[in-house]
Amino acid sequence: MRPKAVVRGGGDLATAAGRRLHVCGFDVIHLEAPRPTVIRREVSFASAVYRGTITVEGLTARLAGDTVEAGKILAGGEVAVLVDPGATSVPVLRPIVVVDAIMAKGRWQLENPTRMGWAECVVALGPGFEAGVDVHYVVETCRGHFLGKVYTEGEALPFTGVPGSVLGVSLERILRAPNEGVFDPLKDIGDLVTEGETVARVSGEPVRSAVSGVLRGLLHGGLDVMKGQKVGDVDPRCVREHCFTISDKANAVAGGVLEAVFRGCAHRWVREGSAGDRG
């Protein structure tokens, strides 16, 4: 039997981690909200909540109605996605690994925070968790020298709110809601946009791109948004393929997750491998 891993969240970093675990021999179940607010939807398993299925770099994730259906999806070699923001299914699923990839900086999961006792190896991405106290390991998500670093004690770097620079463009490449209301996209991910072009509306108010580039990410239509909320991402490099493949940052974080998992569960494979050698 393949070991089981539960990933809280289904955004692009969570998806990179889940995919890495799957190809390395784990059955993976992602837990998501009923209306995910992921931006990089084409590389996020969370999109299965809206579409039923999504395939990212050759691996398909499929929405499950319950844990029994999730088991059937896993048996078919796919990733399962469950709508379970409170992670109430974890005791039923009994994973050996839990990865908290909600990326809420410690604010979202106050009612049911991810805890070390949930599995043999519990990993969290980014700030909001202390390694060795809240979870076993924390993986750095801040771009720079320490991206993907695995912490066995302490916390990740604080959230800055400033996105990484791409061709010298940072804050300008982020699309934000001009007001509170319902989000209505006018463009699709992968479309080329020009500086000043309207790419979406929020209750009639235009969302304009501050730079020219390719639309790498865009919120799902029909969602309620708050003023200033991130609703899209424009990449000035204009490489359309980047919109549909896992990013360098996500791959670095996924590598950190895999390191943490194999450090936390190494005793399993060492013990089982030794027993096999003796046989």
Image (spheres, grey):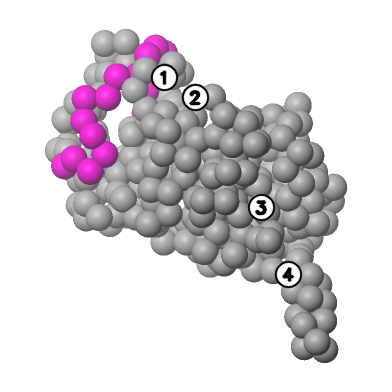
Give the mark toward the camera: 4 or 3. Answer: 3
Q: Residue most toward the bottom?
A: 278
Q: Toward the viewer: 113 or 18? A: 18
Give the CA separation, mark 4 to mark 1.
40 Å
The tag earlier along the polypeptide, 2 or 4, is 2
- Mark 2 residue element: loop
Does the segment drawn in magenta span residue 183? yes
Tell me the number on the disc at residue 5: 3
- What residue sits right under mark 4 in the picture? 263
What amino acid does circle 4 point to? Arg
Q: Quadrant of residue 40?
A: top left
- Mark 4 residue element: helix
- What residue sits right under mark 1 in the picture? 223
Give the CA separation, mark 2 to mark 1.
8 Å
Q: Where does the magenta region start and end? A: 176-192
Give the mark toward the camera: 3 or 1. Answer: 3
In the rendered view, would you say 30 is above or below 177?
Answer: below
The tag earlier along the polypeptide, 3 or 1, is 3
Q: Quadrant of residue 54?
A: top left
At x 27%, y 14%, the residue is 205
Residue 35 in sight in this render: yes
The tag earlier along the polypeptide, 3 or 2, is 3
Tell me the number on the disc at residue 35: 2
Q: Position of residue 98 (x, y in %)?
A: 70, 50
